[in-house]
Amino acid sequence: MKSVLLVLMILSMVAVVVSLLLGLVNLARPNHDPMRSNRLMRYRVVFQGAALLVFAALMMLYRSS
């Protein structure tokens, strides 16, 4: 179970970084789409929330063992 949560943690952290970088690249374009930027930032917030939940679950598992 711990290894599954560890993999989920890594994947969610990578998703946060990728969505952040895509949002920054979109903002750097001269004709960027504000709706796309908003959507990417919402994805980033969701991925960060998922990462926090997985992190909390990992801490609870490591604390109990």
Image (cartoon, rainbow, N blue to C red):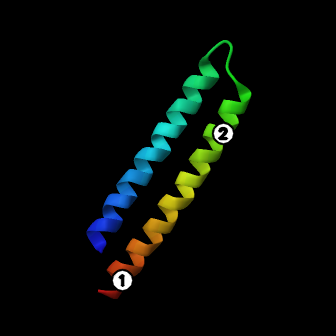
Q: Secondary structure at mark 1?
A: helix
- Please, is residue 5 above or below residue 32 in the view? below
Q: Nearer the viewer, mark 1 or mark 2?
A: 2
Indicate the quadrant containing the C terminus: top left, top right, bottom left or bottom right. Answer: bottom left
Residue at 47% x, 72% y: name it. 56
Q: Secondary structure at mark 2?
A: helix
For disc 2, the neighbor class at 10 Å (few under 14, some 14 to 19, many from 20) is few
User: In the shown orientation, is residue 26 left or right of residue 62?
Assistant: right
Q: Which kind of residue does numbered mark 1 sit on? A: Arg
Residue denoted by label 1 = 63
Indicate the quadrant containing the N terminus: top left, top right, bottom left or bottom right. Answer: bottom left
User: In the shown orientation, is residue 42 left or right of residue 59?
Assistant: right
Instruction: Give the mark nearer the N terminus: 1 vs 2.
Output: 2
Mark on residue 53?
none
Judged from this view, the residue extending furthest toward the bottom is: 64
Mark on residue 39?
2
Location of residue 10 in the rendering, given as x and y in whole percent from the top left corner: 36, 54
Residue at 73% x, 28% y: name it. 34
- Please, is residue 12 above or below residue 35 in the view? below
Q: Nearer the viewer, residue 38 or 64?
A: 38
- Please, is residue 33 above or below residue 12 in the view? above
Q: Which kind of residue does numbered mark 2 sit on? A: Arg
Residue at 58% x, 32% y: name it. 23
How far apart, in angstroms, are the residues tagged by discs 1 and 2?
36 Å
For disc 1, the neighbor class at 10 Å (few under 14, some 14 to 19, many from 20) is few
